[in-house]
Amino acid sequence: VVSVSVLRRETQAPQDPFAFFFMPEGTERQVQGFGSGFIISSDGVIVTNQHVTEGAQQIVVTTREGRDLPARLLGEDPQTDIAVLKVDATGLPTAPIGSSQDLMIGEWVVAIGNPYAYMLGNSEPSVTAGVVSAVGRNLLPSREQAGVYVGMIQTDAAINPGNSGGPLVDALGEVVGVNSNIFSNTGSSIGIGFAIPIERAL
């Protein structure tokens, strides 16, 4: 499991009427974003969420040992919210891939990733445990949600900002989903998280 750090440029909109006079139209600023990912091939192929890499000008992947590796975007699909990265490295440890087809409600699962990565002093991934709350969940579209989230795995394992793109694994440690989004009034986990089934990601 790796941490994914992204630099992107965003157009800044005036926040109040007075800002219109001081902020030229189309003003841009550089914004840093964070997410997680997991290695699926020992030669450096990494899966993460498309909303993590969207608009990225620079992507850096950090391994759990603290090694920073520049990454390039091999491909992305906004509809399924999956992106594939590549780093120039060999002999990397890979995440074992499982199946989401036979998941049972109540089965234990573990979410792994780097929540609030910018606030923590090291790159060691965090682990939260929970159960499969539901399978086959369809999420209604909203302004913040461009992807088509159907057939999702719902879990109460805590998923927070920065966890996006990390793996959801079963009790055998095999990846069954890609952590993607949450329902929350506060922006933090309230125990309603969703993962993309691993078959769709692959």
Image (spheres, grey):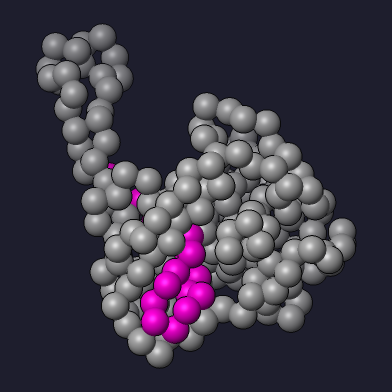
Q: x and y percent of residue 107 in the render?
A: 84, 66
From the viewer's perspective, tell me whether residue 33 is left or right of residue 134: left
Q: x and y percent of residue 73 in the render?
A: 34, 59
Tell me, yes or no, if residue 117 can be seen here. Answer: no
- The quadrant in which residue 175 appears is bottom right
Front-most of 72 and 109? 72
Residue at 34 percent across and 79 percent down: it is 66
Tell me, yes or no, if residue 184 can be seen here. Answer: yes
Residue at 53 percent across and 42 percent down: it is 79
Magenta segment: 31-49
Front-most of 101 and 65? 101
- The quadrant in which residue 131 appears is bottom right
Q: x and y percent of residue 25 in the render?
A: 17, 18
Residue at 32 percent across and 73 percent down: it is 87
Q: Is residue 128 above or below residue 200?
A: below
From the viewer's perspective, tell me whether residue 126 is left or right of residue 171: left
Q: Quadrant of the C terminus?
A: bottom right
Q: Is residue 33 magenta?
A: yes
Residue at 38 percent across and 64 percent down: it is 85
Q: x and y percent of residue 46 in the render?
A: 44, 69
